Amino acid sequence: MGLRVDPCAFFIFLGFALLFSATSTALMSFIQTLCASTAIATLAGIVCVLVSSLFGGFLINIPTLPGFCRWIRWFSAFFYAWGGMLASEMSDGKYLFDADFDGTDVAVVVSGSTYLNVVGVDPSNIGRDAVALIIVSGVYMASA
């Protein structure tokens, strides 16, 4: 499974990667301004990144989380970047998923839309995800 070769898809992917990088940098700068020492800021930053990545959608499938935990994803830059990148790359494709079940090879062709539905990503939210990353990054930069 490779990335799409369409130039538009490449620039969408690159845009989300750059927005995610800017948001992460702004978050760490914001945390540094709140902490008295570099050691405390490093520890706080690591905890924030771990929680954000855990509830971002690619380590834990969001639809399978208990209801009282699902709200955490809205504060995760990983959630917006991963959702936007995944929706951009997979929404129109067909993919071969193969697995070994007790010595039996099983191969199934699955549409990208089906896969996105399973992981809880809506392809129509690419714009929302980009705007959310811009806003979150701006808030962190303004606060730092």
Image (tube, rainbow, N blue to C red):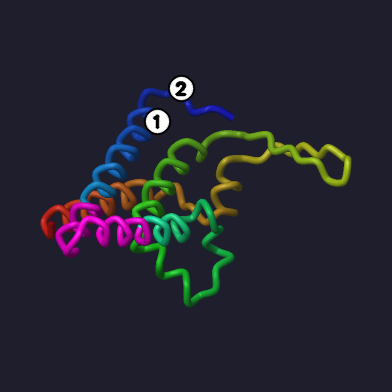
Residue 91 image offset from top left, x and y in percent: 50, 40
Part of the protein shown in magenta: 27-48
Q: Are there few (<14), some (14-19), or many (20+) residues within 10 Å of tag 2?
A: few
17 to 72, vertically: above or below: above
Residue 98, picture quadrant: top right
Pinpoint residue 12: horizontal percent, then vertical percent. 34, 34
Q: Residue furthest right?
A: 103
Compare residues 129 and 49 and report the one nearer the observer.
49
Please state which amino acid type lies under the numbered disc 2. Val
Point 81% across, 39% down: residue: 106
The location of residue 46, given as percent across then percent down, is 36, 56
From mark 2 to mark 1, how far is it between C-alphas?
7 Å
| Residue at x 11%, y 56% (from the top left corner) | 142
Marks 2/1 in contact by CB < 8 Å: the verdict is: yes
Quadrant position of the N terminus in the picture: top right
Q: For numbered disc 1, what is the local secondary structure?
A: helix
Q: Quadrant of the C terminus?
A: bottom left
Q: Amino acid at mark 1?
A: Ala
Apparent side of residue 49 relative to residue 107 in the rendered image (left or right): left
Q: Is residue 28 highlighted in magenta?
A: yes
Q: Mark 1 packing: few (<14 Cα in 10 Å), some, or many (20+)?
A: some
Q: In the rendered structure, find residue 5 and report the number of the disc placed on it.
A: 2
Q: Going 43% across and 38% down the picture, which residue do you hit? A: 88
Asked which quadrant contains residue 107, the reply is: top right
Q: Nearer the viewer, residue 74 or 50?
A: 50
- Compared with 133, 11 (above or below) is above
Residue at the spot of label 1: 9
Q: Percent position (x, y) of residue 52?
A: 39, 58
Q: Which mark is residue 72?
A: none
Image side of residue 8 versus residue 68, left or right: left
Is residue 51 within the magenta segment? no
Secondary structure beneath dot 2 equals loop
